[in-house]
Every structure is written in structure tokens, then in C-alpha cells.
Amino acid sequence: MTLSAVIPVYNEQESLTQLHTELSEVANAQRYELEVIFVDDGSTDQSWQRILELAQADPRVRGIRFRRNFGKAAALQAGFRAAAGEHVVTLDADLQDDPHEIPRFLAALDQGADVVSGWKKVRHDPLEKVLPSRAFNWLVSFMTGVQLHDHNCGFKCYRREVLDEVHLYGELHRFVPVLAAARGWVVSEIVVNHRARAFGKSKYGLRRYLKGFLDLLTVYFLTGFGRRPQHLLGTVGIISFLCGLGGLSYLGVYWILAQCFPEWKWQPLHQRPAVIYSMGALLFGGQLLSMGFLAELFTAYYGRHSEGYSIKACTPPRNSPHALGADPIKDPQP
């Protein structure tokens, strides 16, 4: 079995040698044809020098160095493009992910899964990091329908074909299972051993949860309306437009009655807040409809070379000797 381990690295010089040692132990014990790809995401310590030393000592190690810090999603995408294995496992370089869990990931793939995500059921992290993470994971599962306990876990395993269809940008790395599930790939989860951080400090702060929520909205839009944006923008736009039109129609009738029956002491139209609300709803609805049409134009132009589907299997062509029902006498081969 060929296996590629893609590991983003950012200032983790103390842990790289031990991580390589543990990966080698697992590969030798299980007889994997291992490839280790370290992606240095603009480290300012001696991480790149350590990667060069490991690459010199072990031909299975490859290194990719960014000119500056581009983020974890960019590091993973660069590693995915360089990976040659039929299965790709991702893990962090801080030794909190246990490489000895890799055989269990591959066993889950053998059972029919296409993406296997780790679940750090027992976490060795500060409480201020654990509680927001649990709330975020619940929100992601609720909005996307992909029921995972730990979307944030960087310890995941993929079939090669999945990564050929899922493309990362920004900070969408934590949503790879969601993006894969949206294309019909089977996503599963296993409980993994989570270890306490031995070196350095966490690179994540509270800001990542705000960014994560904004990315969640992006993923929700991409997976649900990425190829039909007018279905979302147009629906909201029509509702807003009709509400505004209804309000203005009511006010128009009100004004006509006020002119016909002045003795009823009607309230002046310019003093009714409904005028402003109705005009705002009408304009907002028109803008959303216009944005929907523009989004459809962009989707039709830039999406014409990308497939909006994912093929799992197909029957052989009719002229193939393996085609179902083919008769070699009635259907001679050319």
C-alpha cells in the first residue's frame, strides 16, 4: 500500500525528528510504501533545516517551503498536489496526533469510507480552546448535515480520488469532509488518541473561530448553491421585493382613501414608517435579484469547464468484450 503523509509545519523544529521516527516505525511495521511530505509554511525557526536533514537521511522525505506564511489550507493543497500515494493522511507536526493510529484510518477506508476524520474524544488542550471548538463543531454539523464530532481535527485520511475533486483555498481545510460529502463521497469518523503538546505553543487563537464561522457560511453557500446561486439570492430577493411591493400597494390604497374621505382624519403618509420599510424591502429585493443574475453569469462562464458531478462507477462501453450482455458474434470487435 502506498501512503502519503502530508504535514504542514510552522515553527515546529523540536518535534520533526520524533515525528519522522514514529512515522517510520508505523510504515516498517505495516509494510507501507511511505512518502512523507513536510510543507514549511513560512517558519521563522530552524524547521526547514530539520526538514532538509531528514530528507538527506531518508529518501522517503520530501520538503516544500513557502516564501511566507500562507496558511494551513495552502500548505495542505501544496502537499496534496505533490502526494503520489493512493491514500493520503494529514496530521499536525506538533506530536499531538499519534501516527500509530494510521492503520485504523486505513482500515476504515477498507470498510468503504472515502474520507475518515479523527475525533479527539479526550483532548489535552486548555478549556478555553475545547469549549469553543465543541460549539463550532456542533454548528458545522447542524448547518451542513455532515455529522462529525470534530471537524477541526487535522488528523484525517483520504482516498487519492477525493483530493482530485476537492480544492482548497482561504481557510477551508477544516471543511474538506463537508466539501467531499457534498460531492457524494462517504465520510466516516474514528476516535483517535490525542496527546499533550510537548513542544512550542498553539498557533490558534480566538480569532480563528470568527474566521471559521465566516468560512462556514461560505461552505454552506458553495455546497448548497455553488452552481445555482440564483436559487438562494433570487428566493430571498423575491420575498423581499414582494413584501416591499405589498407594503407600497397598501400605502397607495391608503393615500387614495385619504384623498376621498378627508373627514376621517387620516395620518399623513410621510409620517408612516411603513413607507421607509417598504421602499427598503423593494430596493433590497431588486438588488438581490440583480446579484443573483450576475452570479449565474459568472457560474455559467467560469464553471463550464468544471464538472458539477462525481462518478463512482460506470459500465464498460458497448464495443468492449466486458460489456454487460455483449455478444462477441453479434457484436464483433473492430
Image (tube, helix red, strand yellow):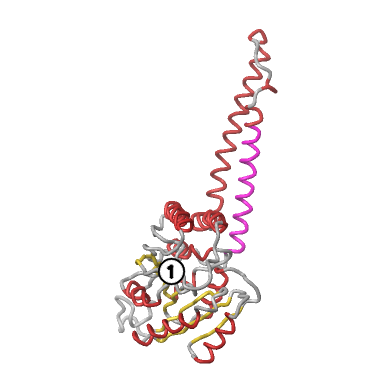
Give the side of residue 183 with respect to residue 210, left or right: left
Residue 103 in magenta? Answer: no
The quadrant of the rendering that contains the C terminus is: bottom left
- Residue drawn 58% across the image and 68% down it: 71
Is residue 84 or residue 262 the one in the foreground?
Answer: 84
Look at label 1 and name its amino acid: Ala
**Magenta residues, as a range?**
278-303
**Image vertical order of residue 109 relative to residue 273, above or below:** below
Residue 261, image x and y in percent? Answer: 65, 10
Task: Point out residue 204 in the picture as x, y percentages from the top left corner.
Answer: 54, 63
Q: From the viewer's perspective, is residue 278 above or below residue 152?
A: above
Dominant secondary structure (helix, strand or loop) of the stretch shown in magenta: helix
Q: Is residue 281 magenta?
A: yes
Please determine whether, in this image, residue 235 is positioned above or below residue 302: above
Q: Which residue is mark 1?
A: 196
Outermost residue to the top: 263
